[in-house]
């Protein structure tokens, strides 16, 4: 498969939908994005008897798949094979186009259902089975129209194994991908490697499997089911990547510029140890890794890989064909653009001690601010402060200083239940509050800053600013935050108060 031939155009995109009542499913049928050609109805989620004829009518005009996922494979169905066969046969009789038959539940067969209307499937919720490849061959031998193999990816090596299996079958009947955070890269990339089917949640907040992406994002961000060539890969590398809007930002830019590139999220346990394996595997798959954004907790490791001085941080890596690695820190440039020159005796507070915190301290010092650092781990705070001309404070609210700038460079805010990273009293009128994390609706830090009258630069605005620098490095074309925001699908822009 040549580099210019990779595309997800032939993959059938399904919006997966599971609700407890038939009425709920019928109501949801009016909410599913009209551009998505197929819908998977999870009959196992129902708390009442399925009404296949009513459901078929509700989803008229779409390819419709009926699924009864057993509890052992991550669903709720606890019946026998005979009961499953009866429900699925009723769905076919009502006009459903396809049914999902679990290979294990069916005893290695297809429940005497028509082969050309069956997706034969296997799901391992514990991990990737040692004999996965053998299982796939056996499922393929059933003659089912489609074969679906899903496993829980516990780390990068699991995800790469799934991608290799998908690629080895080319553009056939097989679909292989992983569940969980580490499996995200397989959901984004398997369609380009020939996956016949791709599943995404039909509606926000209604995922039917761990790590499932929104079907509309698979369509808009990763071009599943539509024409777009992929010859090189860019990645977000971090310990946690499922929350990130970087794939949406960079893929929109690549597409607008007509570049044959795709940006995917890759969860890692160690950048230093796993990046070489990732690069070698992607090269072998025909999608060489050309560059990467680096996020928590690997920015210091990224600097070391790029040959930078000890104690520095990089959020961007570029990979040369000769194995060379270079790095840049667009976080720092984004912060410099947001931070004004300090007034006389101006004091600033940085919360955190990682790569983003280092960039914030350096930018504040360059603008003339005196900087205090507060972090959960005092030793890390001390190491950062001593190398950047700052000081450590254990309790900023008791420092007696009127901080003119407060930077949240911690991960607090990625989860809705996260507490404030500092005393709310520090975020008063006249204070410039800069938030590194971001989420739809704003983090607790951002909400408090607005409520208390601080001047806020939220995490999404900072993301766009640093992404502009990365985009220029990735594409060789100038970029700015406003243009990146404008290229995003309107439904994604609407989730944030975009303030480039």
Image: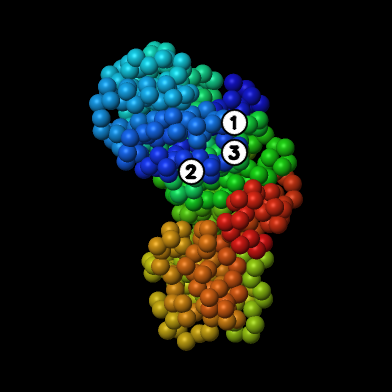
Q: Secondary structure at mark 2?
A: helix
For the question of whether residue 165 can be seen, the reply is no
- State which quadrant residue 313 falls in: bottom right
Please tell me whether residue 125 is drawn above or below residue 362 in the rendered image: above
Q: Are marks 2 and 3 in contact (CB under 8 Å)?
A: no
Please tell me whether residue 92 is drawn above or below residue 486 in the rendered image: above
Q: Secondary structure at mark 1?
A: loop
Mark toward the viewer: 2 or 1: 2
- Whether residue 254 sits left or right of residue 61 in the image: it is right
Q: Residue at x 67, y 62 (%)?
A: 500
* Dot 3 crowding, Cα within 10 Å, few <14, some 14–19, many 20+: few
**Residue at image mark 1:** 225
**Residue at image mark 3:** 34
Give how far across and how far down residue 461 sits, in percent.
62, 61
Q: Are marks 3 and 1 in contact (CB under 8 Å)?
A: no
Give how far across and how far down residue 208 sits, in percent.
41, 40
**Residue at image mark 2:** 28
Q: Earlier in the sequence, mark 3 or mark 1?
A: 3
């Amino acid at each position: 498969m040549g580099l210019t031939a990779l595309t997800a155009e032939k993959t059938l995109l399904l919006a997966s939908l599971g609700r407890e009542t038939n009425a709920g499913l019928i109501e949801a049928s009016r909410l599913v994005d009209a551009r998505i050609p197929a819908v998977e109805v999870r009959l196992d989620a129902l708390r009442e008897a399925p009404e296949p004829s009513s459901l078929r009518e509700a989803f008229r005009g779409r390819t419709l798949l009926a699924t009864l996922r057993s509890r052992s494979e991550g669903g709720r169905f606890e019946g026998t094979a005979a009961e499953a066969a009866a429900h699925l046969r009723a769905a076919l009789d009502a006009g459903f186009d396809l049914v999902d038959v679990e290979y294990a539940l069916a005893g290695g067969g297809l429940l005497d259902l028509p082969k050309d209307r069956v997706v034969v499937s296997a799901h391992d919720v514990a991990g990737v089975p040692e004999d996965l490849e053998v299982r796939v061959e056996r499922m393929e031998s059933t003659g089912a129209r489609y074969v679906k193999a899903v496993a829980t990816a516990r780390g990068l090596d699991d995800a790469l194994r799934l991608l290799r299996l998908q690629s080895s079958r080319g553009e056939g009947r097989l679909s292989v991908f992983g569940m969980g955070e580490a499996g995200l890269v397989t959901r984004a990339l398997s369609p380009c490697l020939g996956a016949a089917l791709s599943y995404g949640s039909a509606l926000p907040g209604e995922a039917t499997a761990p790590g499932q992406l929104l079907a509309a994002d698979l369509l808009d961000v990763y071009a599943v089911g539509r024409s777009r060539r992929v010859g090189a890969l860019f990645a977000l590398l971090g310990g946690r990547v499922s929350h990130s809007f970087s794939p949406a930002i960079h893929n929109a830019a690549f597409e607008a510029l007509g570049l044959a590139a795709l940006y995917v999220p890759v969860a890692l346990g160690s950048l230093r140890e796993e990046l070489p394996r990732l690069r070698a595997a992607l090269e072998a798959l025909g999608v060489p890794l050309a560059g990467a954004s680096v996020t928590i907790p690997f920015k210091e490791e990224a600097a070391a890989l790029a040959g930078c001085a000890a104690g520095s941080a990089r959020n961007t890596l570029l990979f040369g064909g000769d194995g060379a690695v270079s790095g840049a820190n667009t976080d720092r440039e984004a912060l410099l653009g947001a931070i004004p020159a300090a007034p006389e005796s101006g004091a600033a507070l940085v919360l955190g001690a990682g790569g983003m915190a280092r960039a914030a301290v350096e930018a504040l010092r360059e603008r003339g601010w005196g900087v205090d650092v507060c972090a959960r781990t005092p030793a890390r705070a001390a190491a950062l402060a001593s190398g950047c001309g700052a000081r450590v404070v254990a309790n900023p609210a008791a420092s007696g200083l009127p901080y003119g700038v407060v930077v949240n460079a911690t991960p607090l805010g990625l989860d809705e239940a996260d507490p404030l990273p500092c005393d709310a009293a520090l975020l008063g009128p006249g204070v410039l509050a800069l938030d590194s994390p971001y989420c739809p609706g704003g983090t607790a830090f951002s909400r408090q800053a607005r409520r208390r009258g601080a001047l806020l630069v939220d995490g999404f605005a900072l993301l766009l600013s640093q992404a502009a620098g990365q985009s220029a490095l990735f594409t060789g074309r100038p970029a700015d935050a406003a243009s990146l925001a404008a290229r995003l699908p309107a439904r994604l822009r609407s989730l944030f108060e975009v303030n480039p």
